[in-house]
Amino acid sequence: MLAYYCAYVQTYGMNTYPVGKAAKLADIGPTTARDYLRAFPEYFTDGATPPPGSRRALAWQDIETLATIKELRQQGNKDESIRASLATGERVSIQSHTDDTEASGQTTALVAQLSAAAAQWEATAGTIAEERDHLRQQLETAQDARLAAEIRAQDAQTELRILKELTQDKTAQGEKTGFWQRFFGRG
């Protein structure tokens, strides 16, 4: 979410508005604003008409375009006539809504803090990835050691089985065998 917000601010700037706020500034309802955005997409910025699933971010010029369409509709103009007026660059001038310097400074500070937090998160993610790789290597080493131990255990069991068979053969023949004789297989 943090990366999304930073990318949003970098792409559209801090002076963009969601549909509801832009509609209010243009003195229309949010549904009407969306209708205008769908009906006349070629006269709005890319942020105002993003791909499906993306959030809209209207610039001040988009708000003036919304206000222009509203005024032309109130005058009884049809869509073709509205398009012609918009194509000539006709726009209703609305007194610019600017945040005071303090609020703008706070926004800039917030973006800086968010960027720093994103950088810290990325560094932490890098450390976690390194630790994960280290643990994988330790796991592989442990699995190799376990496999070697299993092979040694199988070899020991085979040797033990052979010794038991030798001892049983000698005992069955009535011979007594000592430890060293059994160990070296002489009896």
Image (cartoon, rainbow, N blue to C red):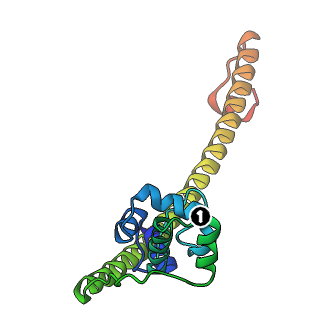
Residue in the image at 65% along x and 67% along y? 80
Q: Is residue 10 above or below residue 41?
A: below
Whole-percent x and y of residue 152? 66, 41
Residue in the image at 77% along x and 11% along y? 173
Residue in the image at 46% along x and 62% along y? 33
- Residue 161 vs residue 77: left or right? right
Q: Is residue 93 above or below residue 184?
A: below
Q: Nearer the viewer, residue 76 or 95?
A: 76
User: Which structural element holds mark 1?
Assistant: loop
Whole-percent x and y of residue 129? 52, 64
Residue bearing mark 1: 78
Residue 134 appears in the figure: no
Q: Amino acid at mark 1?
A: Lys
Residue sitting farthest toward the bottom:
101
Assign the C terminus to one quadrant of the image. top right
Whole-percent x and y of residue 142? 57, 51
Whole-percent x and y of residue 158? 72, 30
- Residue 87 vs residue 28: left or right? right
- Residue 147 vs residue 16: left or right? right
Residue 26 appears in the figure: yes
Q: Nearer the viewer, residue 172 or 23?
A: 23
Q: Nearer the viewer, residue 75 or 87?
A: 75
